[in-house]
């Protein structure tokens, strides 16, 4: 009687050899999660002209979003007691004086603005962006979002971000002293990990 080849196969041994390892399952879960977290394309522009030059059919949206980002920058951006403290963090001539009924302060100029969904005129999202030119700052030449998140090198302009990148940030009313900017950004270096309102406010 001819014996079938399959009869000599140790099935229990094969099951052990081909069992899915926990590490592989973990990697697969991370990959699936990364693909399904609803990230969206976003670009950073330095000003209106920069945006219009790359999106000539959306000049109005570029301008409106820029104006709105300026207002948001003043509301949510870092604020300092003195020009000296602000320029120590952001660089010479990179800060402006703002006077309001609630008080006066110095804050950095908006360095650019991040835009997403520009092709959907009624749904586009924006947020102001800051950067430091100070030789004393570890965030020199890096894009920093309104909430204090470090997006990386200033030369990079295109990103894939989560929708909460454009969620409204808390209004900043407190002023900081020298060193406040760096410590706040470091606290927010992991996305979503910081629970404090932005820029010490």
Image (spheres, rainbow, N blue to C red):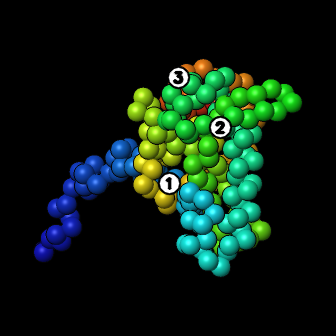
Where residue 143 appears, as percent x and y from the top left, is 51, 46
Is the residue 117 above or below the residue 149 in the image? below
Discs 1/3, front: 3
Which quadrant, please, contains the N terminus?
Answer: bottom left
Q: Earlier in the sequence, mark 1 or mark 2?
A: 1
Task: Identify the residue at image location x=21%, y=55%.
Answer: 10
Pointer 3 local density, CA inside 10 Å: few below 14, some 14–19, many at least 20: some
Q: Pointer 3: what residue?
A: 179
**Which residue is outermost to the front?**
93
Q: Estimate the x, y position of residue 81 in percent, counting from the top left.
A: 66, 22
- What residue is rendered at 28% in x and 49% in y? 16
- Could you say whether the residue bearing mark 1 is in a helix, strand or loop? helix
Residue 140 in picture, x, y percent from top left: 44, 39
Asked if residue 198 shows in the view, the reply is no
Label ID, residue 34 = 1
Measure how far apart labels 1 and 2 are at the Cα level. Answer: 40 Å
Residue found at x 55% / y 21%: 178
The disc, 1 or 3, on the residue closer to the chain's N-terminal end is: 1
Q: First in sequence: mark 2 or mark 3?
A: 2
Relative depth, front residue between 183 and 30: 183
How far, Cα to Cα, is label 1 from label 3?
34 Å
Crowding at dot 2, Cα within 10 Å, few <14 / some 14-19 / many 20+, comes out as: few
Q: Which residue is mark 2?
A: 96
């Amino acid at each position: 009687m001819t014996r079938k080849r399959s009869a000599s196969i140790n099935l229990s041994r094969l099951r052990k050899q081909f069992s899915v390892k926990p590490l592989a399952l973990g990697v697969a879960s991370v990959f699936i999660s990364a693909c399904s977290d609803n990230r969206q394309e976003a670009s950073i522009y330095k000003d209106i002209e920069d945006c219009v030059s790359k999106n000539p059919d959306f000049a109005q949206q570029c301008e409106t979003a820029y104006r709105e980002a300026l207002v948001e920058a003043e509301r949510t951006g870092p604020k300092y007691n003195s020009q000296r403290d602000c320029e120590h963090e952001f660089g010479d001539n990179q800060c402006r004086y703002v006077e309001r009924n609630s008080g006066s302060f110095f804050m950095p100029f908006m360095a650019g603005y991040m835009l997403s969904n520009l092709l959907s005129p009624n749904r586009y999202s924006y947020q102001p962006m800051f950067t430091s030119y100070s030789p004393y700052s570890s965030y020199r030449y890096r894009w920093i979002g309104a909430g204090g998140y470090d997006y990386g090198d200033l030369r990079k302009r295109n990103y894939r971000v989560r929708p909460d990148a454009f969620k409204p940030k808390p209004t900043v009313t407190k002023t900081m002293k020298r060193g406040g900017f760096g410590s706040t950004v470091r606290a927010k270096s992991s996305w979503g990990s910081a629970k404090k309102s932005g820029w010490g406010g």
